[in-house]
Image (tube, rainbow, N blue to C red):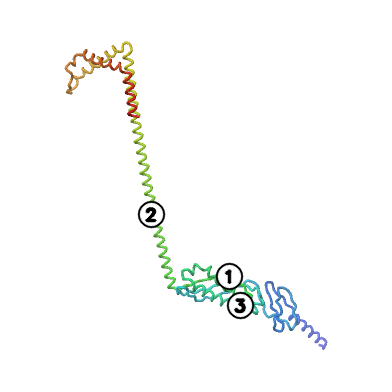
């Protein structure tokens, strides 16, 4: 190999090394921090870049993607002096590569430690019973504390989630007994409310039944009374009509003679039946004197004839006044 060939190879190798030192390709959603002679020069975004050889170098590489950071379990004490084991997960994002490189030495470690201290402080202000209900509030307090401090590190804290809260076994047993007692209490209250409602429903039903029965009895009695009144009124009207017809017949020609005949026949028929019964009766002394009895009856009929019309009207009016 000649000296010329060796020199050419050396030149080619030098060019390759120079390209490797000066050509930089930055991936998408990433930033590279470049230093020149140990001093910050610039921040490179995504794409192809050429650096000044031997003077510039990529000092830090930062990803701008959202990063999950596991926060290990730690011991926290509540306001009522109960010890809890709490762990979680933190989501953060680099928004300024320069500050994340020069603002703090290790922003992952710093945010994890600050998340733990902020969570201990937040849990120390509440009681055990409120710890499980206040997860959202605790998460918000941790994010607020971290975001304020991380703004100087070029890091944005997006959210923090408590993953698990583990009380001591004795506390868990006490909480289980408390929850069991609370469930039994609610069940007993529900049963008593059901019995109360059932009693009220039965009482309401009995009351409604009694009202309906009394209303039915009332209507029954009213209907019976109205029926009796109508019956009495109709009988009175029929009686008055009969009296009126008798008076008209008596006033007609031959009416008196027909009445004498009817009275005589009825008297004889009824008198003839006295001997057919074994009843003891008191009869007038002149019971066998048919003519005198007929004369007495006819005198009464004549008197009734004279006052028939007025008597009929008076009877009907009194009946209406009495029964209407």
Q: Residue at x 51, y 68 (%)?
A: 134
Return the residue at label 3: 107
Query: Residue visible at 64% across and 75% down?
Result: 154
Of the pair 244 and 91, the residue shown nearer to us = 244
In the image shown, does 2 or 52 lie closer to the viewer? 52
- Choose the circle earlier in sequence order: 3 or 1: 3
Q: Residue at x 55, y 71 (%)?
A: 141
Asked whether the beta carbons under mark 1 and mark 2 sit within 8 Å of each other, the answer is no
How many residues crowd mark 3 within 10 Å: few (<14), some (14–19), many (20+)? some
Say what secondary structure mark 2 lies in: helix
Where residue 40 sits: x, y (%)? 70, 80
Q: Is residue 85 shown left or right of residue 3?
A: left
**Residue 220, image x, y percentages:** 35, 36
Q: Which residue is mark 2?
A: 196
Q: Residue 171: x and y, percent?
A: 43, 72
Residue assigned mark 1: 159
């Amino acid at each position: 190999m000649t000296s010329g060939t060796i020199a050419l190879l050396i030149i080619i190798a030098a060019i390759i090394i120079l390209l490797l030192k000066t050509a930089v390709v930055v991936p998408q959603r990433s930033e590279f921090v470049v230093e020149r002679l140990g001093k910050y020069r610039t921040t490179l975004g995504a794409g192809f870049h050429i650096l000044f050889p031997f003077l510039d170098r990529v000092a830090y590489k930062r990803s701008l993607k959202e990063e999950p950071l596991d926060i290990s379990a730690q011991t926290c004490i509540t306001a009522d002096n109960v010890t809890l084991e709490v762990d979680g997960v933190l989501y953060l994002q680099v928004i300024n590569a320069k500050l994340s490189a020069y603002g703090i030495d290790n922003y992952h470690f710093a945010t994890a430690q600050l998340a733990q201290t902020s969570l201990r402080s937040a849990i120390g202000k509440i009681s055990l019973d409120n710890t499980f209900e206040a997860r959202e509030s605790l998460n918000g307090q941790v994010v607020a504390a971290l975001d304020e401090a991380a703004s100087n590190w070029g890091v944005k804290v997006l959210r923090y989630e408590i993953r698990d809260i583990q009380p001591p076994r004795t506390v868990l047993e006490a909480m289980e007994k408390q929850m069991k007692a609370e469930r039994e209490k609610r069940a007993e209250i529900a049963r008593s409310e059901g019995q109360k409602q059932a009693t009220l429903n039965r009482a309401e039903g009995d009351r409604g039944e009694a009202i309906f029965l009394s209303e039915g009895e009332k209507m029954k009695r009213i209907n019976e009374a109205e029926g009796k009144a109508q019956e009495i009124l109709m009988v009175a009207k029929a009686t008055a009509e009969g009296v009126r017809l008798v008076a008209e017949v008596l006033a007609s020609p031959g009416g008196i003679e027909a009445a004498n005949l009817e009275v005589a026949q009825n008297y004889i028929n009824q008198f003839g039946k006295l001997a057919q019964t074994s009843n003891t009766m008191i009869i007038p002394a002149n019971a066998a004197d048919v003519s005198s009895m007929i004369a007495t009856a006819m005198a009464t009929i004549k008197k009734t004839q004279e006052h028939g019309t007025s008597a009929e009207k008076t009877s009907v009016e009194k009946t209406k006044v009495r029964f209407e």
